[in-house]
Amino acid sequence: MSQNLSITQLGAVARITLTQPEIRNAFSDEVIAEITEAFTEVGGRADVRAVVLAAEGPAFCAGANLNWMRRMADYTRQENLADAAKLAEMLRVIYECPKPTVARVQGDVYAGGMGLVAACDMAVAVDTAGFCLSEVKIGLIPATISPYVIRAMGARAAHRYFLTAERFSAAEALRIGFVHQVVGAEQLDAQVDELLKALTAASPNAVRACKTLVRDVAGREIDAALIAATVEGIADIRASSEGREGVQSFLQKRKPSWLG
């Protein structure tokens, strides 16, 4: 059993929980490898329909832990390249997880932790959570997490918060689109459950295809190639077994087969 995280499953929902509250769930190369493995495993489970990324204690994730940072301080450039590649792979695996992912943000999120939240499909945060891209304060940049964070908060907000390293509130995270909802601590689980209810009620195949659709379409020029790809996408899903079942169940006013 890992001391760094736990994996549980209840029904169709898997939960990956960071379990190092004593160090604010800061991660190391070991934790990065475990998170990567955890998302790969649950993403491949046929009976999983949604994945929650959660954490224990007052902080969601404070970024890199101090012992790891001390080791990195002496790395050569080649060692830094290899190390950063592992972090990049973890974020890619979360972002491309075939199952929808929800970040349950119960506390502060700093530095690399921002990448964890941004790589998930959606995020719900408590109203007391603070957020910070603190890298420039210690002479670094949020390079590896930037593709995901910029997609989540937009370039305009990134210009400010990447450069100033200001701490900002959950309300501001909501305003700039970094999180989808902000609630009181007593409402956090209920709000996450509402999202899970919607996700597990939808066609698993359609949800998977929608994740790919967003990645493929976002930011692209609307040209003939993109239009052709979207035409193929809807034709393929209509012709699929779940697509046919979904339409027939709607027309016949009955539950689709994936709801049992």
Image (cartoon, rainbow, N blue to C red):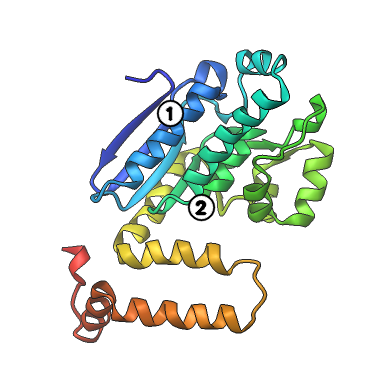
Q: Secondary structure at mark 1?
A: helix
Q: Position of residue 109 (x, y in %)?
A: 62, 34
Residue 130 vertical position relative to residue 72 in the rendered view, above or below: below
Query: Is residue 176 left or right of 136 when viewed as pictured?
Result: left
Question: Which mark lies nearer to you, 2 or 1?
Answer: 1
Look at 83% across and 41% down and name the residue there. 163
Look at 23% across and 50% down and name the residue there. 47
* Mark 2 residue crowding within 10 angstroms, few (<14) / some (14–19) / many (20+): many
Amino acid, disc 2: Met
Q: Secondary structure at mark 2?
A: strand
Q: Which residue is mark 2?
A: 122
Amino acid, disc 1: Glu
Q: Position of residue 213 (x, y in %)?
A: 49, 68
Q: Which numbered disc covers residue 176?
A: none
Q: Quadrant of the C terminus?
A: bottom left
Query: Is residue 239 left or right of 172 when viewed as pictured?
Result: left
* Mark 1 residue crowding within 10 angstroms, few (<14) / some (14–19) / many (20+): some
Q: Quadrant of the N terminus?
A: top left
Q: Quadrant of residue 240?
A: bottom left
Between the C-alphas of marks 2 and 1, the distance is 21 Å
Look at 58% across and 39% down and name the residue there. 88
Q: Quadrant of residue 117?
A: top right
First in residue order: circle 2 vs circle 1: 1
Query: Is residue 229 left or right of 40 when viewed as pictured?
Result: right
Q: Position of residue 101 (x, y in %)?
A: 44, 49
Q: Are marks 2 and 1 in contact (CB under 8 Å)?
A: no
Q: Residue furthest left?
A: 260
Q: Position of residue 194 (x, y in %)?
A: 39, 55
Q: Which residue is mark 1?
A: 34
